[in-house]
Amino acid sequence: MATAKKAAAKKAPAQETAVAAPAVEASAPAKKPNAAFMKPMTPSADLAAVIGKTAVPRTEVTKKVWEYIKQHNLQDPANKRMINADAKLKKIFKKDQVSMFEMTKLISDQLS
């Protein structure tokens, strides 16, 4: 009976010892956004048909293209990484289907 109490006593402190996550410093400087991404870019006529004619930063261009893709249900249901082009996107992509990684390169070619 004495051994059962000793075993229980040994287990209790082991459960209380948890490794604490390192604290994040509150005074850490905020990361500056890259100025190249924030520079307004003018879309081509084909891209303007999808996102609008106003000059917007690259980050906004990508967001607007994704909004268009989701609104028109253009993601391939079998493979979500693939984008099926409709008539407007086909002018930009020059293909029926592109991967989401290839899409960003093709869109950047449409910006000036």
Image: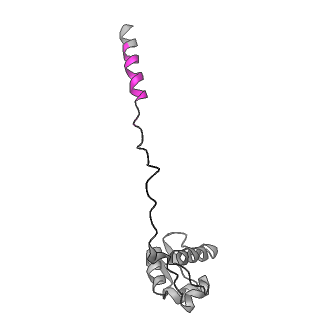
Q: Residue furthest right?
A: 71
Please state, as top left, top right, bottom left or bottom right, where the N terminus lies in the image. top left
The residue closer to the viewer here, 36 or 62, is 36
Task: Give the color scheme: rainbow, by chain, secondary structure or one colour.
Answer: one colour
Magenta-drawn stretch, dominant element (helix, strand or loop): helix
The residue closer to the viewer here, 96 or 38, is 38
Give the residues drawn in magenta, as a range. 6-19
Task: Please provide percent x and percent y for residue 75.
Answer: 55, 73
Q: Residue furthest top?
A: 1
The residue closer to the viewer here, 105 or 1, is 105
In the rendered image of this protein, does residue 104 appear above or below residue 4?
A: below
Residue 13's quadrant in the figure? Answer: top left
Task: Please provide percent x and percent y for residue 34.
Answer: 44, 72
Is 14 colored magenta in this rendering? yes
Residue at image location 40% in from the left, 30% down from the top: 17
Residue at image location 46% in from the left, 83% down from the top: 108
Task: Please provide percent x and percent y for residue 25.
Answer: 44, 49
Residue at image location 39% in from the left, 36% down from the top: 19
In the rendered image of this protein, does residue 14 appear above or below residue 31?
A: above
